[in-house]
Image: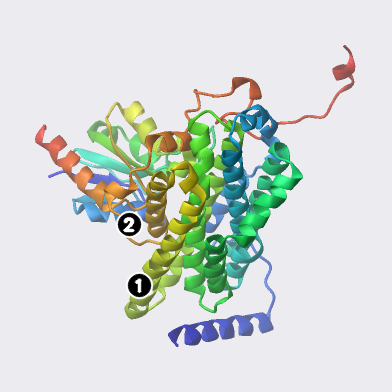
Amino acid sequence: MPRIVYFSNVSENTKRFVEKLDLPAVRIPLQASEQIEVAEPYVLVTPTYGNGKDESGVPKQVIKFLNIKKNRDLIKGVIAAGNTNFGDKYCYAGELIAKKCNVPLLYQFELIGTPHDVTTVKERMDLMWKQF
Amino acid sequence: MSDMLISSSESDKKMKLASKITRPVNWNKIEDPIDLEVWNRLTSNFWLPEKVPLSNDIPSWATLRPEEQSLTMRVFTGLTLLDTIQGTVGALTLIPDALTMHEEAVYTNISFMESVHAKSYSSIFSTLSATAEIDDAFRWSEENVNLQRKAEIVLNYYRGDNPLKRKVASTLLESFLFYSGFYLPMYWSSRAKLTNTADLIRLIIRDEAVHGYYVGYKFQKGMELETPAYRAEIKAYTYDLLLELYENEIKYSADLYDPLGLTEDVKHFLHYNANKALMNLGFEALFPHESTQVNPAIMSALSPNADENHDFFSGSGSSYVIGKHEATKDEDWEF
């Protein structure tokens, strides 16, 4: 069964999207000092922060999580949340992680995601897991 | 009735607090991390219309037909009206309902930026148009029934006594009501017209996203304190208000865009943004996927690629940055 690791800040938009997927999911802790390690393949769901030129847009908690080699080794894909109002920075965190970890950017969605987003992501995750 | 009870008990609480002690805002003690995060985002996004080289659009403006020019002016006076409401009434009415002192400070920032937005349309007008045409466009927006109706609906909630309904009205304005207007500069930009004006509008669109996100978030925090029954009532109210505004928005869009045959295209953009407004409030999208498929030309105008700078020589384009400055030195004047 597909597994999710996700980060969501206190506004919990990404958390609400992940809950709608109804898949096993682990949340990266808000406190950057708390670390988690995963043992099985997963897809990462992350929001995009900031839109300045120098910012990566990747939440620092996600960076810390991916700095652990074991976590990096098990990532199979990334799904990013954002807002098209931010122009070319839309879901930038996802593009960056996909490039750095050499995994596909499976999907991009806005805010808490629409029903269409949820169905599409579930389909793509299922398809992906069948290939393992 | 329940509205009355809630607001009176809330204002009682505020009165008691106020009569005891006046507190200075302490930014070293953050109760809600989103306050600081949004404050930082808003201040780092700060911009002024004078930094966008609008005058580069003059040749392009001259290529528009008279009815296209007049449509553009009307769209911008409509947007000016909404920004005026947000700057002088909307964001300010949210201050007394704030849960933290930092939230109050964020609203003052939002209020000021809305006034910057309102003023930036005047920069566009004075750059592109003559006084008589500007006056005509302002008169149109004062006389257009559907635009006035839109303003009236929102203002009623701002003047009302329900903090949650005020936040709903504010979020719908920031995340939905602007977009019938935002459509046009994106449309021109997709045809390589008024591209500097589009740059300025994109800065406004970026700000509105943060405003809608923040007010929507605070709305959700407020909802957490309510009973499930009252939450259901507010949710039903939100969808009702959205539909009321939507019906009006369709008429307003037809007034503007029918002559150019663009109304159907605009509707898709409205559906798409209405869904986002609802999601900012934590509610599920209403309009079905097919009806929210925005013309790809408009979507790509919203998101110009940083390395496809359309107007290299203007120094503007999508990669807008606030200019850096330094003091002049004597050597600077040795030619």
Measuring from the top left, give residue B64's x and y in whole percent: 59, 33
Say left or right for A6 vs B173.
left
Q: Which residue, given by chain and number where applicable, does mark 1 sit on?
A: B236
Toward the viewer: A105 or A3? Answer: A105
Q: Residue at x 63, y 83 (%)?
A: B15
Quarter-of-image position of residue A126:
top left
- The chosen color scheme is rainbow
Work out whether residue B175 can be spotted.
Answer: no
**Lower position in the chain sequence, tag 1 or tag 2:** 1
Say what amino acid the circle numbered 1 marks.
Ala
Say left or right for B65 vs B245.
right
Say what amino acid the circle numbered 2 marks.
Ala
Give the quarter of the figure containing the C terminus of chain B.
top right
Measuring from the top left, give residue B134's x and y in whole percent: 70, 47
Q: Residue at x 46, y 62 (%)?
A: B248
Mark 2 burial class by Cα count in 10 Å: few <14, some 14-19, many 20+: many
Say left or right for A42 vs B226.
left
Toward the viewer: B293 or A39? Answer: B293
Toward the viewer: B4 or B290? Answer: B290
Q: Residue at x 49, y 37 (%)?
A: B187
Question: What element does badge 1 sit on?
Answer: helix
Q: Which residue, given by chain and number where applicable, does mark 2 sit on?
A: B285
Quarter-of-image position of residue B57:
top right
